[in-house]
Amino acid sequence: MTKFILKYWMIDLLVGIVLYIAYVMAIMGSSASGNGFGATIRYIADLVLNIGFSLLYLVAAIICSFTIFLNFIREIRFSPFFSWLSFSGAPILLIGMFIASLSLDGYHYSGNVMTKLWIFVILYPCITTILYLQFRKQYRKLNKGIGKATIYTSNNKQV
């Protein structure tokens, strides 16, 4: 079971890192609008702000990936709802906190920064939910295989 859960943790961690790299590439793909010193300063400030958000995104994705280890607890692993929360609950909670934070002071940031960030913030829980569905499917197969196995005690009695 340890290898099984570690495999899904590694996949989740890689998804977070790939989304981070894609986000940084989307940031770097933008260019300065206009000519002159003022446009260059705005572009650099926008780039620094985007890199700051991308680092927060990476840290959040790494922290959220560790919640998959809650599936080592038998009660969580057996409950589909709690198991789903261990995959997607933390990212959805962070989205809620992000929405609350932006509703309070989101007017400070440009729309371009927020549009790219929203795409990647919403994409991560969707991917973790798909990963959860694959986890449950594999877990059911693994559980059926273990359930059919005959276990013998030291006295050669069937359990």
Image (cartoon, grey):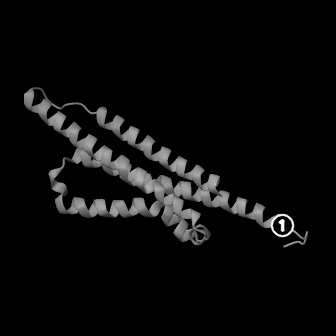
Q: Residue at x 46, y 54 (%)?
A: 65
Which class describes the residues within 10 Å of circle 1: few (<14), some (14-19), or many (20+)?
few
Secondary structure beneath label 1: loop
| Mark 1 lies on residue | 151
Q: Residue at x 49, y 44 (%)?
A: 14
- 118 or 8, nearer to the observer: 8
Can residue 68 be seen?
yes
Q: Amino acid at mark 1?
A: Ile
Residue 89 location, x and y as percent? 44, 64
- Choose top left, top right, bottom left or bottom right for residue 100: bottom left
- 36 or 59, nearer to the observer: 59
Q: Residue at x 62, y 70 (%)?
A: 78
Residue 74 location, x and y as percent? 61, 69
Residue 106 location, x and y as percent? 19, 56
Residue 54 location, x and y as percent? 31, 44
Q: Residue at x 49, y 55 (%)?
A: 128
